[in-house]
Image: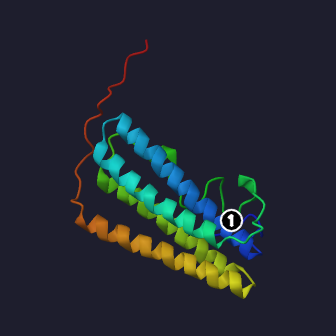
Amino acid sequence: MTSKNKSVSTIGGLLYHAYVIEAEAEARYLDLADQMEVHNNLEVAALFRLLAEYEGKHAAHVEGLRPATPQPPLDPWDMSWVGNEAPETIAHTAIDYRMTPRKALELSLRAEKAACEFFTWLAGDTEFDEIREMAKTFAAEEQEHVEMLERELEKCPAEGPPPEDWDQPVDQG
């Protein structure tokens, strides 16, 4: 992983990055849960709500660690990850209203792995011991999430082809 900036040179900066990662993941999971409910995919909606709850708890934990004078907010393009979204955020384009619980878990697993890779990269990129150790701690926490999702995936049955599209295209001609 490469960084576009060297913006993480303080504990406050690291905690700000960690908070944004968790808060954006929570918000995206809630958004995805709402989308699944609109399409009456209640099983996947419930899974996304559970994952949002986990991310919210992590965001609150990180918020509690932030110093009394927190890092000033950064614009998305000034964050240390590549792209404009946090590494743990599932892309809207990856979502299909016919999604199965297995597919939701697979997407979540990819997101958790991306967050783990980000913190691992950050730990290796910094020259500051305190930042390195905290980044390693965050990477280990994300790895625990990866392992939990892998265990959940083992319980999910293999899937066949996706279900038929419930909303057939309408001829616009």
* Residue furthest to the front: 68
The residue located at (22%, 50%) in the rendering is: 160
Residue visible at 30% across and 66% down in the picture = 152
In the rendering, at what x and y percent does residue 29 appear? 46, 51
Q: Residue 137 in the image: x percent, y percent?
A: 56, 81
The one of 89 and 45 positioned closer to us in this rendering: 45
The N terminus lies in quadrant: bottom right
Quick check: 9 left or right of 132? right
Residue 66 is situated, as x and y percent measured from the top left of the image, at 68, 70
- Please state the horizontal and vertical placement of residue 70, each as a whole percent of the image: 75, 66
Please, what is the three-letter code of the amino acid marked with disc 1? Tyr
The residue sitting at the bottom extreme is 129
Protein image colouring: rainbow
**Quadrant the C terminus occupies:** top left
**Residue reaching furthest to the top:** 173
**SS at mark 1?**
helix
Taking depth in this image into account, of 173 and 93 the one nearest to the observer is 93
Question: Where does label 1 land, which residue?
Answer: 16
Identify the residue shown where x is 30% and y is 43%. Answer: 42
